[in-house]
Amino acid sequence: MEILGPIPVELDVDKVQKKIHAPKRTDIEDMVALALSLAEPRAAFAAAYVDAKGADEVVIAGNHFRSRVLRKNLDDVGRVFPVVLTVGPRLEAAADSADMLARYYLDMIANLILAEARHHLIRHLGKRFGVEKLAWMSPGSLQEWPLEQQRPLFALLPGVEDRLGVRLTDSCLMLPRKSVSGIYFPSESSFFSCRLCPRERCESRKARYDEALVRAYGIDH
């Protein structure tokens, strides 16, 4: 397992203001400066190898992952990159102690910092392992790959809690909350779990729901 960080992140204040629909730029400028001073984006990652593939599961470094979609995405893949990425606890603590409006702004800015840190991580993984294009899946992003699959994913990164400060709760949520986990894998085409998710209202949606793709993956909702 390797640790990347602190990951450098820059945010354009005008873009942030537009993204979070804030009325005053000066307020957001101060919030962005505060958030960037408190954020500590860091990531844990590793290279792991696929041991076996079943009809709807895949074994990675001895850990079983049950997902028809993940299995299909790894048809021609032998090496994957499990990842845990976090903004750290300080920004979250500041948001929790702020008033309602400031908490909303800081929460939204934290999401943008996390997204920018992910872009940096993808570039780093590509250079580190000589991979041109990477796709991503995350436990809990689809009903057929439930959040409980966080446990075998974290097992692929032994010591991640001590070295990165991210832990799983009994219900497999991550703390600090502004953290993401998943498996990156080489892919010639982009993959978005959103295309397999029928949820209509989702601020994080990156692609339209695709019924034909759902049938191609052989999954039910």
Image (cartoon, rainbow, N blue to C red):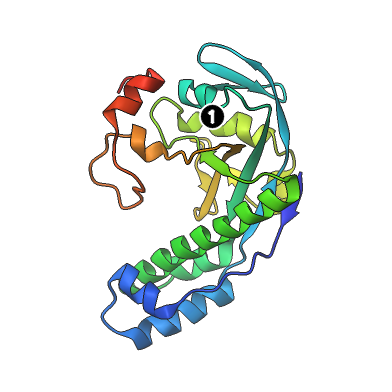
Placement of 142 over or under 190, stated as above or below: above
Which quarter of the figure has residue 156?
Answer: top right
Is 16 placed left or right of 43 in the picture? left
Q: Could you say which is closer to the camera, residue 103 or residue 25?
A: 25
- Quadrant for the C terminus in the image: top left
Q: Position of residue 59 (x, y in %)?
A: 64, 20
Residue 19 located left or right of residue 111: left
Q: Residue tagged by mark 1?
A: 149
Q: At 52% from the left edge and 27% from the top edge, which residue is drawn?
A: 73
Residue reaching furthest left? Answer: 200
- The x, y position of residue 77, in whole percent, is 63, 27
- Residue 82, placed above or below residue 34: above
Q: Is residue 103 visible?
A: yes
Residue at 68% x, 49% y: name it.
Answer: 125
Amino acid type, mark 1: Gln
Can residue 169 be seen from the camera position used here? no
Identify the residue shown where x is 57% and y is 68%. Answer: 39
Residue 1 appears at what percent x and percent y? 76, 43
Mark 1 Cα shell of 10 Å, populated few (<14), some (14-19), many (≥20): some
Q: What secondary structure is marked by label 1?
A: helix
